[in-house]
Amino acid sequence: MPLDIRTIPCLADNYAFLAHDPETGATALIDVPESEPILSALEDTSWSLTDILITHHHWDHTSGLAEVLAKHPARVIGSAADSIRLPPLDLAVSENDSFQVGSETFSVIDVSGHTINHLAFFCERSKAVFTADSLMALGCGRVFEGTKSQMWKSLKKLMALPSNTLVYSGHEYTAANAEFALTIDAENPELIARINEVNQQRASSLPTVPSRLSLELSTNPFLRASDPKIQNNLAMIGANPQDVFTEIRNRKDNF
Ligand code: ZN
Ligand code: FE
């Protein structure tokens, strides 16, 4: 049975997720932007928390941890290499490690770029990946600590996952990302259709997260650095995709 995954809006535009294994009752929380909405989601569902997965050290992904742990003791999992900047970990993990939450296996992918040692967690059986501030809906995280080539390498790992994977990213930035995407990909009919859907979702205050990886591959400009149409729009035909990605990221930084 696949995980039952709930999207929990937190702070101004963050998301946390609860991933519940119906077979065993085990429940993982992915990121802890603040405690209150997470505590009420646990109350609403009556799920008992077993694990807390931290994607990266930024405060808007970790701030609520102590308050959640005080009410729901759980195993805290995060990057071994970043343990010095993270709250105390019960399980420190690295790229290609995997661990169980109930009957589901979570595999660890290093997606450094936004921060060094940013992790993504992929659930093969449930076809879900938790990407926080690496791959986002119609976008990718700003590159703060790593290099743009590192971010491109990280995105390529995510692009190689099964295309029916659902991408659970860490922020509701999709409408703003859509405006930028149009500046370099205005003639993409799939992008235009997606933006119409995003606008409808946001008008009803619905989350645009998760999104299907196949849709990101056809509409997210940051994943399309190899696409001749994008390269043509950037006057970079035949350029190295990593350079095209860098140009797209630079433009977004100044958008
Ligand atoms: Zn962040
Ligand atoms: Fe963030």
Image (spheres, helix red, strand yellow):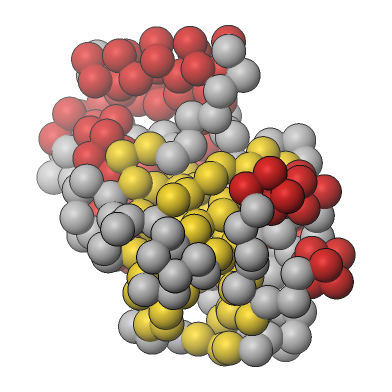
138 to the left or right of 19: left
- Which of the two residues, 165 or 184, is positioned nearer the viewer here? 165
Name the foreground residue: 76 vs 138. 76
Residue 236 seen in render = no
Q: Work out whether 4 lies above or below 231.
A: below
On-image quarter of the N terminus: bottom left
157 left or right, relative to 24: left
Quadrant housing the C terminus: top right
Q: Nearer the viewer, residue 172 or 165?
A: 165
- Residue 6 seen from this side: yes
Asked if 194 appears above or below 98 in the picture, the reply is above
Residue at the spot x=49%, y=13% of the render?
199
Q: Position of residue 153 (x, y in %)?
A: 33, 65
What is the number of callouts on the image?
Answer: 0
Q: Is residue 102 left or right of residue 165?
A: right
Does residue 115 lie above or below 208 as drawn?
Answer: below
- Residue in the image at 56% along x and 23% along y: 206
Q: In which quarter of the image is residue 54?
A: bottom right
- At 22% from the left and 40% from the top, the residue drawn is 214
> In the figure, residue 29 lies in which quadrant?
bottom right
Which residue lies at the image location 28% right of the left edge and 44% below the top edge? Answer: 213
Residue 135, image x and y in percent?
A: 43, 50
Picture coordinates of residue 158, whole percent (x, y) = 31, 59
> Residue 68: x and y, percent?
79, 64
The residue nearer to you, when weighing 154 against 59, is 59
